[in-house]
Each structure stands twice: as structure tokens, then as C-alpha cells.
Amino acid sequence: MAKAQASQNAQMDAIVALCKRRGFIFQSSEIYGGYNGFFDFGPLGVELKQNIKDAWWQDMVHRRDDIEGLDSSIIMSPKIWEASGHVGGFSDPMVDCKVSKMRYRADQLFFSPVVVNGEIIGYVSILEDGNMVATAQAAAEKVKRKQGVQGKLAPIKLKDYTEADPSQYELIPSPATGEPGSLTPPRDFNLMFETKVGALSDSTAIAYLRPETAQGIFANYKNVVDTGRVKIPFGIAQIGKAFRNEITPRNFIFRSREFEQMEMEYFISPDADWKSAHREWIDWCKNWLVSVGLPEEMLGEDVHPQEKLSHYSRGTTDITFRFPFGEQELWGIACRGNFDLTQHQEHSGKSMEIFDEAAKSKYIPHVVEPSLGVDRVLLAILTAAYTEDEIGGEKRSLMKFHPRVAPYKIAVLPLLKNKPELVDRARTLYGKLQRKFNVFWDASGAIGRRYRRMDEIGTPWCVTIDFDTVEKDGTVTLRDRDTTEQKRVTEEELLAFLDEQLF
Ligand code: GAP
């Protein structure tokens, strides 16, 4: 178990190191020591991210007849957040350690009594991770040893801190100090970032950075209905930044304070079978994840129990992904009923009803919402793509990105940089390819080294221009990243191949 954990940590460390080394992701404000919960995307990261968003937009909006796009403002009237319930209820339970001044999310801090021969001899605590049961059991053994107690240690039973009885707060050790007595009771902490709009600095100027893009969709739903030709069922999709003052941003870009969401609200009739609409969207989302390169066996489903549903939800299923730090939520698919539109109708006084031509009736539609974090799916894609293998006895690390999301689609390599006839021919091909794809130019270094550089950043193909190209038949060498196989193709064959692969 400990071995598996070490190798998962090593994988995560290798991904983070590669992201920095090759310019995918940097810590925000790094020159000032970093800024917790914020990240910057470098030259390769921005391409990867853009390709993910483009793939989603193409499949969700362009390739469907029933979904329209939207781009609403980040800062909206605070009344929207009052109506949606975010001002009153968008909070996570937090707990402070009075000694270390560390702050934790109470639902991610787990504890268990240490029970020997049926008697509680102490408590252990642990922060949520994929391997916490084994780690907590080992910690319980240690408590028993330290106290010199003989007898049978019961298996630990983990609960999160929100489930603790108030009498236990004083007894549970802080994860920071290992000692009990310093943890506060859980308190609600609102995750919205506040800002001020306009010249006044009193409470009337308070506004919020949006914590989800969804409310921009609900606030514009009537505009889309009135100006477009939408008919129930239909959807409105949006990609954009969201901000949450997360208590414990962690696991690299998995949970950050500034991130992007790709959300779609699918409006259905109140009489529609929302459970089957929900299922259809879960399946659609899973298929989409597989289409951008996530192996199906790394995906799972987590059905939220009724008592843990968000304030707006009547049913939520998360598609989960096996990250190096454990299986975690990747894509939330929630049935929001007509909660949001009803709230906005009540608070704004504007009707949110739609006339359903087919049913000849007027109603406030219900909603199924697939909501995916761009940064989170990017991390899943990095995780799935990261591979180490051996080629001709030499170790190599490569990113097996699906060609659709790979930052560069192909690299053009003249065999020798000091042979103008090779370089000129390669430059001409490079120019041709550049009109359609993001192409990498690399003329320096041994050809094997150049291939490795491309493997490491996940470029699916390399094309080499050599003396046969200029002196014989004009063919080029096309090399595949994953198999390292090479074959000679004509320029026409190369262009046709790329068009077919990069749909
Ligand atoms: N509109 C519904 C909504 O925002 P959510 O479950 O809070 O629901 C949806 O978020 C998705 O947004 C999550 O499944 C995740 O992919 C992403 N997400 C949420 N919080 C995030 C954070 N702090 N950092 C990165 N991604 C986040």
C-alpha cells in the first residue's frame, strides 16, 4: 500500500516537474515566492487548454443543433447571487488550528477514535487522500504503542470533522501539530471573492467575482429565448473564468482559486423524464472525455446521496477520474429542477416562462447541468498522457496526448541545419502546414534528440526532410510518437493523413 502511494506521489511530482520544465504550467507570481491557489499557463499549457476548450465548444455547440453559446460578464449584479442562494449559502465548513494557524476544510479533515479492547484510548486525524485509511490505521498503531497499551486494536472508523460530536472537538489532534485541543468547531466560510464596483466604498458597492458561470446563463436565458429560435429541449453553453476563495487549494491545479468552467444548462419540460435526460448527459460527457484521450477505465461515477446534494440539486452524479492522489470528481452533472429560474423570476419580477409550441403550454423549464472544470480536465489529460517507456534501451518520458488536444500537432525537422536545400524545402512545408495546424520547427541537434523533445511535449508526429526528399522522390519521413515507427509518405499523403486524424 505504502509502495503504491509512493509511486502515485512520484507520478504527480513528475507531472508537476514536467509542466514547469517544458512550459505548461507555472506557479502564479513565482518571482515573489508564488501565490497559493493561482496558476499561470505557459506557451504549451495555453495551447493545450485552448485545444480542450475548442474541442468542447465544437462538440457541445457547433456539432449540435439544440445548443447555443454565450459569453456573459464575470461581475454581475449582486442581486443575481442573492437570488441564486450563493450569498447566503455558498460556503464550505472550515476548521482552524489555533496553534499552527492552519485552516482546513472540515469535510476533508477525517478522524477516528483509537479503540483497544473496546475502549477509546485517543484519536487520530488525517487530511483526505486516496490512501487515508491505511495511513490512519498506522497512526492508530503508533498511538497504541506510544501509550504502551496491550490488547486488540480495532479497525479505525473514519468520519469527517463535520460529523464529530462537539464533545470530540477537544480530543481530535490537529493535523498540523499532532496534538489535541487546538481545533475549533466547524464554521461556515463563504467562498465568494468580494470586490467593489464604482467610486463609493460602502456596502452598496459590494460585488462578487462569479463562483460559477451557470448564473450568467440563467440571467440571459430569456434573452436567448427571445432573440433566437430555440425550442424545448435546448441548451445554452458557456466557457469562462470562475473564482472561489477555496479554504484549501491543493493538488496542483485540481482545486484552485481561479479556474475556468465549461458549463451547459439544458432546458427541458417539467413533464420530461429528467432521470433519463440526466443519464443521457452522463453518457455524453463520458464519451466526450474518452474522445479527448482519457481511458474509460480511469473514469467512474459517484452518485451523490440525497442528504449531501447542493441546495439547488434534485440529483447529481459526478464523473470521477483516477488522479495520482486518488479518485476524485472531474465533471458534475446536476439536475437543478427549476430552482434557479424560479428564484430569478421571484427576485427580478421578470417572467422566466417559455411557451412550448409542441405542448401548447407555458412553464418555467427544468434544467440538467453538466459542469466541467477546464483546469481539472487538463490535469486529468496530463495524468493519462504521462508515460515512461524504453526505446532501444534508453528511457524516455512522453506525453501521449490525443492529437486533438496536443499543443503541437506536428514538428518539421530538416535533417541537417547547414544544408540550405533541406532547410528551404522544410521551411516551405512548414509554411503550408502552419496555415492549418500549430506546427513546431526544430532544425538543431541530433535527430534522435529532436524526436525525444517532441515526445516529451506530446507532439504526435514528426516529419523529417532528408536528401531523399530533395534528390529523389520528394517523400518525407513521418514518425509516430507512440510507436516510434517511421514511414515515407508524399506531401499529399501527409496532408490527407493529418486532415483525417485531426477532425
Ligand atoms: N454550476 C455548478 C458548479 O459550479 P461545482 O461542482 O461546484 O458545480 C463544477 O463545479 C466543476 O467545476 C467541478 O466538477 C470541477 O470540474 C470544477 N471546479 C469546481 N471547483 C473548482 C476549483 N476550485 N478548481 C478547479 N476546478 C473546480
Image (tube, rainbow, N blue to C red):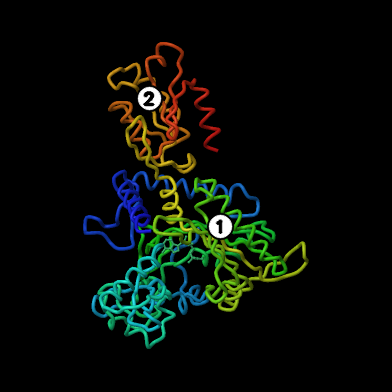
| Residue 380, disc | none
- Outermost residue toward the top in this view: 472
Few, some or many C-alpha atoms within 10 Å of disc 1 (few <14, some 14-19, many ≥20)? Answer: many
- The answer to whether marks 2 and 1 mark residues whose Cβ atoms lie closer than 8 Å is no
Few, some or many C-alpha atoms within 10 Å of disc 2 (few <14, some 14-19, many ≥20)? Answer: some
Q: Is residue 66 left or right of residue 451?
A: right
Instruction: From the top left corner, tell me how far across and down residue 140 is, in percent.
Output: 33, 73
Front residue of 475/262: it is: 475
Instruction: From the top left corner, tell me how far across and down residue 149 is, in percent.
Output: 29, 79
Residue under pointer 2: 427
Instruction: From the top left corner, tell me how far across and down residue 87 is, in percent.
Output: 45, 77
In the rendered image of this protein, does residue 138 appear above or below residue 422?
below
Q: Is mark 2 within 8 Å of ligand 1?
A: no
Front residue of 75/38: it is: 38
- Outermost residue toward the front in this view: 151
Residue under pointer 1: 237
Q: Is residue 288 left or right of residue 114?
A: right
Residue positioned 61% across, 64% down in the render: 368
Residue positioned 72% across, 70% down in the render: 362
In the rendered image of this protein, does residue 223 appear above or below residue 499?
below
Residue positioned 57% across, 71% down in the render: 313
Q: Secondary structure at mark 1?
A: strand
Give how far apart the Cα atoms at labels 2 and 1 are: 40 Å
Front residue of 348/139: it is: 139
- Outermost residue toward the left in this view: 32
Q: Amino acid at mark 1?
A: Ala
Instruction: From the top left corner, tell me how far across and down residue 150 is, in percent.
Output: 31, 78
Figure label count: 2
Q: Amino acid at mark 2?
A: Arg
